[in-house]
Image (cartoon, grey):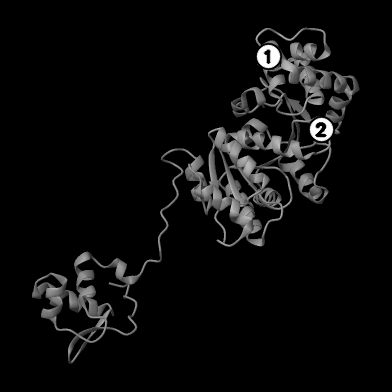
Amino acid sequence: MTASDEERFARAALCAVAEPGEALLGRLIARVGPCGALAVVRGEEPPPDGVVIGDGGHRRLTAWRARLRAADTDADLAVCERLGGRIVCPGDPEWPVTLDDLGDRRPYALWLRGPADLRYACLRSVAIVGARAASPYGLRIAAELGAELADAGWSVVSGGALGIDAAAHRGALAADGQTVAVFANGVDRFYPPRNEALFVEMLHQGLLVSESPPGTDPSRPRFLVRNRVIAALTKGTVVVEAAVRSGALNTAAHARDLGRVLMAVPGPVGSRSSAGCHRLLREVPPARCVTAVAEILEEVGRIGTDLAPVPRGPVLPRDMLDPVTRAVLEALPARGAAGPAQIAVKAGVDLTTASGRLGQLSAAGFIERTTGGWRLRRRPAQPDPTP
């Protein structure tokens, strides 16, 4: 059921008065709805029975009431509309129901800019996160994963930050795929400024998403709080590169708490930029080690359908031999030569079989006859593929 205009306005106002993810406000909304929660914030209604306020809650209500007096929700909605954006609320067709897994810390509403449908884009989506001060290795891996996920029809969700986030977004865009950036500020402000060109491109092909109304500046707490949204929107989170004190590990913790698939890309063993990834791989339960998109899709895709192929080494000519012929070949000494009878005993076959297979191996270029018996060719020729 689509949110009414009154509910939409109330949720927009609540976005302006409270920080994202306030569990107390989430409980109020769950108990009396967004309009009732706004009435409680205004002081028009008492807190409902069953919602414990406490001293900390009263302080929050006082702070929210002060912010509400300074807020201009009509102006926020007008700015959003002027930018071609929209506000999406629980109950709207575009609302991703996976956000409901956040419980009391579910977003009050989301402010969006961009042509993609958020709910549809997130049905098959993967979060790619990592360090801002990424290495060339990490940037390359993030861009490749983003592009290959897009080629496979999956959306890439990240935080729009410098480093791994931006590389993953750019990779998806380069493959003409959909990508979603979750901001810690209003969607009217491009932060960091160095990614402005990236965000402009996403306005034509992806989505910019925020829990905060236009005009909101980023802050460190908001970066950490928005990470829960990145984790909740997606089927799984891939940490490409992260130091031991990286914000990406905060996103990883949210993914694990929400029951999403947590994956990590290994890096060089001595790299500080990958120390956080290696820690995730050693924890209990460990993150899944992934090195390619096929492995990511095996973790987040459909059971029995999106299976990664088993890694195999190069196929050698001797791999094409039948078991008996291979046994005869393996029976030849590494140095020197041996007679047919000696080879037959070592291979565990009779003399007639050994003699026949030795002839086949000679014709195929694996061995050669000498005065002392059969020996391996120094440089085996490739078998002739023609009959």
Q: Which residue is mark 2?
A: 84
Looking at the image, residue 108 lies above or below residue 174: above
Q: Amino acid at mark 1?
A: Val
Whether residue 126 is visible here, answered yes or no, is no
Q: Amino acid at mark 2?
A: Gly
Q: Image quarter for residue 19?
A: top right
Q: How many marks?
A: 2
Query: Quick one: 108 or 285, which is closer to the camera?
Result: 285
| Disc 2: CA contacts within 10 A as few (<14), some (14-19) or many (>=20) | few
Residue for point 30% across, 70% down: 318
Residue for point 76% across, 20% down: 11
Q: Image quarter for residue 50?
A: top right
Task: List x then y, in percent, for residue 117.
Answer: 68, 32
Label whose residue precedes the other's in the sequence (2 or 1): 1
Gap in Å between the C-alphas at discs 2 and 1?
Answer: 40 Å
Query: Quick one: 48 or 209, which is closer to the camera?
Result: 48
**In which quadrant is the N terminus drawn?**
top right
The reply, left or right, for residue 182 in relation to residue 68 is left
Task: List x then y, in percent, for residue 351.
Answer: 9, 75
The reply, left or right, for residue 7 in relation to residue 366 is right
Task: List x then y, in percent, for residue 218.
Answer: 80, 39
Residue at the extreme front of the image, as rendered: 55
Q: Which mark is residue 97?
A: none
Residue for point 70% across, 10% down: 32
The reply, left or right, for residue 179 in relation to residue 63 is left
Q: Secondary structure at mark 2?
A: loop
Task: List x then y, in percent, for residue 379.
Answer: 34, 83
Q: Secondary structure at mark 1?
A: loop
**In which quadrant is the C terminus drawn?**
bottom left
Looking at the image, residue 81 lies above or below residue 359: above
The reply, left or right, for residue 83 in relation to residue 254 is right
Q: Which residue is mark 1?
A: 52
